[in-house]
Image: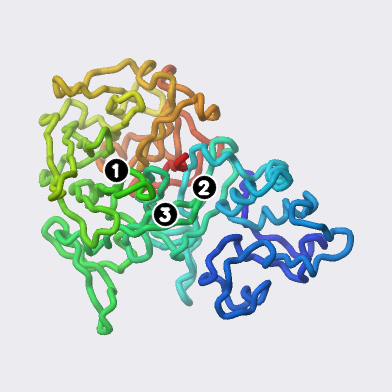
Amino acid sequence: MAALNLRRRHDSGSIPLPLLLTGRISRIPLFRSPSSVSDEEKTIGDTSSAAPPISLDDEFPKATAMGPYASAGWSDLPIDLLIRILHLLELPEALAFHAVCPSWRSASVAAGGVPPRRTPWLVSLAEEPLPAGDQQRPVRRGLWDPTATSELRNLVDAEKTFQVSFPWGQAVACCGASHGWLIMANELSDLVLYNPFTTASLSLPPITGFASCIEGVYGDEGNVVGDRYSCYESDSVYDVRSLGGFFYDKVVLSGSPSAGPAIALSMHMDGKRLSFARVGDSSWRQVSVIRRSLDSYADCVYHRGRFYVVTMEGKLKSWGLSGPEDRPRKKTIIAEGDDYFFELITRYLVSTPWGHLLQIRVVLDKYQEHYVRVDVDRLDLKSSQMVGVSPAKALRGHAAFLGQNSRGILSVDKFPEVRPDCIYFTTPRLRGDVEHRHNQWSGVKVYDLRSRKLEDAFLSGGGHYGTICPSEVWFTPSL
């Protein structure tokens, strides 16, 4: 696979003189906060103790430019130098680079390294974990090994990968993507909202805020050293970063927190529990528990002012959160399950731009290629039933992106690189023995509702993704 990381290593012996304007190569990402800059890096462009925001003038002082490459302004830099600079940047800075001026935009296009911002991205954690002291570093990242970066792929050029670092230093799992924000579990297993294009971050309540099942374990100095996890009448103590790799099933938001107060719904504990919290709260409010061993929550979505949740058996409930007391109001819409449970891989809920709530059933079918069939239903609120919809007409020419993300319907008119009447799936979370035994699903797939064929979304297969706790997610930047 021809992978490209925007910030990749270069052999200094192969870098031409224009890049060595200051006699050394600076690796400070543009617009990075001064607190994250090392003492060595601070010597470039600014030596004060309270360094101002880093700019291009700090990176490459004009006074040191020399020879035929000296120019009157940054917009006049030669295109080969601009391309070299671009390759030293991570994705957010490269997108800002693209927007500076026409000459920089031309260099960005010539480099072929920055797809349009508006298109869907596949986000996964980097395969390499953080170093663990003097211990031998594993070749591949384990389930709860933290990593410092994520890898992004874009459907415009699917065989290239882009790298984005996390501002807090490390992450354990991708738990969702909603309204232009990634929802990540950090090194303490706490949930953090992160916008990879603006580098803004917000905190959700800590994992110890799930008081009904999580209790912090504290050391002699009062710091949290572990988490006691009460699950199925047994208690286990985990390292602080371990639970983040498997505790959260999916997290969705009611809206963008940058536009106003937002509520988060967490589906967790192997799909057995639901909890709500507002951005800025200190704890989670548990609202539902499934005590039967067979059933579990399959998916959740925010649709027309309410959170809707469907179980693996096909039961459907909704919650509204409003009013002065902020009390959750539950409504049972479908109380009985359907007949698909034992042949079901998973279910998804999709909120459409035309106001319908769709259920996507992914079913094991031995008569289909890859043993997969996709059925589509529409919720009829008057009868409180799911009504079958012709798969070829269900999306009305749109494309759907399903997995741990929400708001996954896109118009092919606005996103011409996606295929109409197709569903792009990340690897589904598999819980039952039947699914594991017969399912041949691995990697990121696209299902054509007209031809009923399941294909790889990327020629390379899209990576090496697990089915126990999949950690990749579709992400569409807010427009």
Q: Residue at x 19, y 31 (%)?
A: 314
The answer to whether residue 337 is left or right of residue 58 is: left
Q: Residue at x 40, y 19 (%)?
A: 396
Q: Quadrant of residue 188?
A: bottom left
Q: Nearer the viewer, mark 1 or mark 3?
A: 1
Picture quarter with the N terminus: top right
In x, y percent, where is residue 120? 49, 38
Label 1, on which residue? Answer: 254
Label 2, on which residue? Answer: 152
> Cβ–Cβ below 8 Å for labels 2 and 1?
no
Label 3, on which residue? Answer: 194
The answer to whether residue 95 is left or right of residue 318 is: right
Query: In the image as oriented, which residue stretches furthest toward the bottom?
Result: 220
Element type where label 3 sits in the image: strand
Q: Residue at x 73, y 46 (%)?
A: 103
Q: Amino acid at mark 1?
A: Ser
Q: Amino acid at mark 2?
A: Leu
> Cβ–Cβ below 8 Å for labels 3 and 2?
no
Q: Nearer the viewer, mark 3 or mark 2?
A: 3
Element type where label 2 sits in the image: strand
- Decide which of tag 1 and tag 3 comes sooner along the chain: 3
